[in-house]
Image (cartoon, coloured by chain):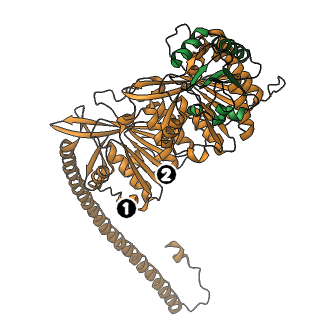
Amino acid sequence: MSSSHQIQLNKTRTGIRGLDEITNGGLPQGRCTLLAGGPGCGKTVLALQVLVNGAKNGEPGIFVAFEEDASRIVVNAATFGWDLPDLQNKELFFLDGKPRPEDIWAGAFDLSGLLAMLKAKADQINAKRIVFDSIDVLLSLLDNPQAERRELFRLNDWLVSNGMTGIVTCKNNDSGLSGLDYKDFMQYMVDCVINLSHEMDDRVAHRSLRVVKYRGSGFYSGEVTLLLGDQGAEIIAFPESSHDQVASTERISSGVPRLDSMLGGGYYRGSAVLLSGAPGTSKTTLCGIFILAACQRGEPCLYVSFDESVSEIVRNLKSVNIDLEQYIISGLLHIQSIRSGLAGTEEHVGTLRKLLEAHQPRCFVIDPLSAIVHSEGDTRRRMPEKMLTLTKASGITLLCTSLLGNGGDSLNEETGIQISAVADTWIHISYSILSGERNRALSIIKSRGSEHSNQVRELIIDAQGITLADVYQANGEVLMGTARWQKEQAEIAAEQLLLANVEYKRRVIELAQSEVNARVEILQVELAVKQKDLELLLATEATRLGSLDTSRDELWNKRSGDDTKPSMPLKNDV
Amino acid sequence: MYKLAIVPESAHKMTTATHLFRLYIAGEAVNSVLAQRNLKGFCEQFYPGNYQIQLVDVLLSPERAWTEGITVTPMLLRLSPPPCIKIMGNLSDTQQLSNVLSSIND
């Protein structure tokens, strides 16, 4: 099995969430992995879970317990729901190797007998995985550095030659004292080393894990969080966000029509929206109305609230005409309340991920996200960012709130949560105190990929819900509340006065117009009369000339009776 | 490992020797060979003619070693006289060996 011409490194999937991801597929198959860590790091649980997952998937395993009684390990593991009693002595075998206080040592020993026995057992049950927990208990009995190294070599060779995937746990304190050198040696010998640590982070226990080495394979070398939940070990590792997701151009309503128009049509589907503001700036109400709008569209929603109970949220939102009860009953909306102080940031992020998977929402609210960011540590502060990239990858529209002070730091990027950089849209609500009033001012700090209003709006909440009102500027001050109302009333009066003025002027002009029109009418009548006069004159003249011709002829006839008449020059002379 | 305390009835019937030992070994492993030699030397010195040693090679009967909970080799079990004593290692520390066996014996 240890043939040098074996090019492809095979991996054994651990079945532990996150661990397979950070190791790019699992532990090295047929080789030895070292799990090193101090007390309470989760070495035993992690190792046992690898065995259990194997046993459930047709890879029987052996657990060699040097530190704890096998029976106690089985009892302890009962809380994880692994069905150990079912697996035990079929796919999973325990060997109790814990030294007893009454054991007497007289001289050197070695592992050849143990390994021969394990080989026989492994052959019998076709075991593929084996755990030695923890090897330092056994090695400390050797009390001889050369012997320790020799036995470790023996163990490693045995694993490799038998094609068994081995996990060796080892205590790891940072005392750096002599006599611990085999632990260093072990790190060189094995093919994969995973370090576990356990520390307090703002009074919350925090377990973490790091792959230190993995021969022949790439791995994620950063520190990740190890959770020991009710299902056993889980590693909070997020796959590196791929930036080739198709960005949606669909807009969804924020629930407040005016806010939608300020944003250029609403939030983008699948975007991350950050609502920041001081306490009491109705961030939760904006979350509620967003959820209500989503529920009315028939989209499944998830609302996670930290430190506020579900009934409180529902009651408070109902008081401003946001009634979510029917959607909770119909199952479209799930509201989950979580105590923020009970766990560290990563555990919360892990819980959120589980909730997302369980409810598959399209719209997701975390209120407030700042509640779960305790630490100033960089890696932990980046956890919410990873959460955001996760929701983006799933096309979930995320609305999260963040508590921010009001002291002019609203635009400061050092806000404790670095999500402001990741969020697509950042809406800030601040208080404005003027003339003995406290009013809420909403503005959009940024909104990627869309034109958005640069205007500050006053956020008004009453029993009808949320409305946004224009704010007024007077003498360099922004007016809100009753000051705004007064200004509004004054503007209405001024407007009415202006309207009256216009009406008056219109009438004056209309009068003048009428006068001119009347005059035009008179002139037209006069013109017609003159026309008639002219026609009459011409007609009279024509009649006169006609009668003159007739009478001349008659006169001619009476005077001479001559047939030859002269031309009629007279007519032409007229 | 507590199973070791159960001494097979047959072990007593097979011999009349007062000192009955069982030594678990792993084939020709150095420590196993040393343990056999050390034990034999010790018995010849302290219980001449009044001892018996059963050898169990875990390479040959691994299933038995599993059920009897053997984790390290060599390992010595004193079955008789009672109480049952378990001693790990190649028994090169004869001082420790005689201390343990004689003190409990007396």
In the shown orientation, is residue A91 left or right of residue A452? Answer: right
On screen, residue A515 versus residue A418, left or right, reads left
- Eyeballing the image, is A561 above or below A65? below
* Residue A282, numbered label: none
Q: Which chain's colour is green?
A: B
Residue A174, above or below A418: above
Identity of the residue drawn at 20% across and 38% down: A438
Residue type (three-letter) at the residue carrying disc 2: His
Residue A31 visible, this orientation: no
- In the rendering, what colour is chain A? orange
Residue receiving disc 1:
A326
Q: Position of residue A507 (x, y in %)?
A: 24, 59
* Residue neighbourhood size for the residue with mark 1, other residues' Cα within 10 Å, grouped as few (<14), some (14–19), many (≥20): few
Please tell me which of labels 1 and 2 falls first in the chain: 1
Viewer-nearest residue: A568 or A274: A274
Q: Is residue A218 left or right of residue A68?
A: right
**Residue denoted by label 2:** A359
Q: Secondary structure at mark 2?
A: helix
The image position of residue A180, as x and y in percent, is 56, 12
Please determine whether, in this image, residue B96 is positioned above or below residue A277. above
Q: What chain letter is assigned to the residue under label 2? A: A
Q: Position of residue A298 (x, y in %)?
A: 47, 59
Of B29 and A423, nearer the camera is B29
Where's residue A411, x and y in %? 37, 28
Tell me which amino acid carries mark 1.
Answer: Gln
